[in-house]
Image (cartoon, coloured by chain):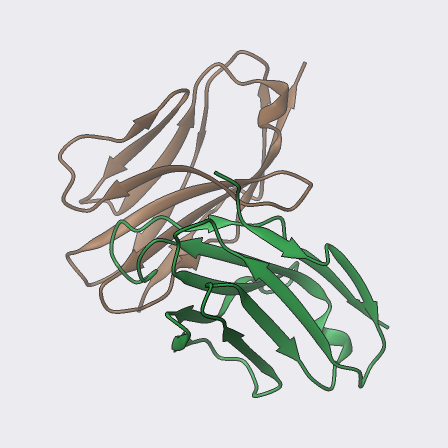
Chain colours: A brown, B green
Amino acid sequence: AQKITQTQPGMFVQEKEAVTLDCTYDTSDPSYGLFWYKQPSSGEMIFLIYQGSYDQQNATEGRYSLNFQKARKSANLVISASQLGDSAMYFCAMRDTGGFKTIFGAGTRLFVKA
Amino acid sequence: KAGVTQTPRYLIKTRGQQVTLSCSPISGHRSVSWYQQTPGQGLQFLFEYFSETQRNKGNFPGRFSGRQFSNSRSEMNVSTLELGDSALYLCASSLRLAGVIGETQYFGPGTRLLVL
């Protein structure tokens, strides 16, 4: 069965430092996609980055990069040069060909300290 | 392009009432999915509509229903509200079916429903 696990309920990071948010997933399907979303206190889910299971390189989008380790079934989000505006909930999500829906992890709340 | 819009943003209802939430997808997007977000259960998939047809449904009771119009706008209805229905209801749109690998869903700001 599909499963997404985010083991860090909360994380603190100093402004301008890098931070890694952990995500592990479970699926028996060789074809799947992994997503990261940011949810500020306003509630809107903001798409950050996508990694496909067959992608050879780790995805990057500006200050966001995805550390994809397929054998370990992990897809950690790395945020470089943290900013105060990065304080939010971050969700890892997955979709495979077996399901017709996206499943989400429990989320990690990131606090950026000035 | 305008993003996904949801109305109303906030809603207070009492038990037993019904409620209708609205979602307008990004222009050109044909898929609309609905999610319920609560502190206890996290984000849970409700259903997806594509070309006015429900394509997939999550594990929610029949009190939760939806529909999609020819312009891709979607409505979600909850009848006989219960206290446990208090949640943030998020709508997401995508160009193709959300089940397509790599298809990115874009979310609206959500409707916060409080049931008293």
Relative to A12, does residue A38 appear above or below in the rendering? below
Q: How many marks?
A: 0
Q: Provide residue B97's location: percent of width, then percent of height.
A: 31, 62
Reply above or below: A110 against B90. Answer: above
Q: Position of residue B85 (x, y in %)?
A: 70, 73
Quarter of the view holding residue B90: bottom right
Residue A54 picture location, percent across and down? 14, 44
Q: Image quadrant for the N terminus of chain A?
A: bottom left
- Which residue sits furthest front? B70
Position of A20 with respect to B4 (left or right) is left
Work out whether residue B28 or residue A55 is closer to the camera in this orientation and state it: B28
Q: Nearer the viewer, residue B38 or B18?
A: B18
B55 vs B89, left or right, is left
Asked if residue B12 is positioned above or below residue A52 in the image, the reply reads below
- In this image, A94 relative to B91: left or right? left
The quarter holding residue A99 reads: bottom left
Image quadrant in which you'd find residue B113: bottom right
* Residue B86 place in picture, x, y as percent: 73, 68
Q: Residue at x 40, y 62 (%)?
A: B31
The quarter in which the C terminus of chain A is drawn is top right
Residue pictured at 63% horizontal, 55% vertical: B6
The front one of A83 and A43 is A43
Judged left or right of residue A40, residue A22 is: left
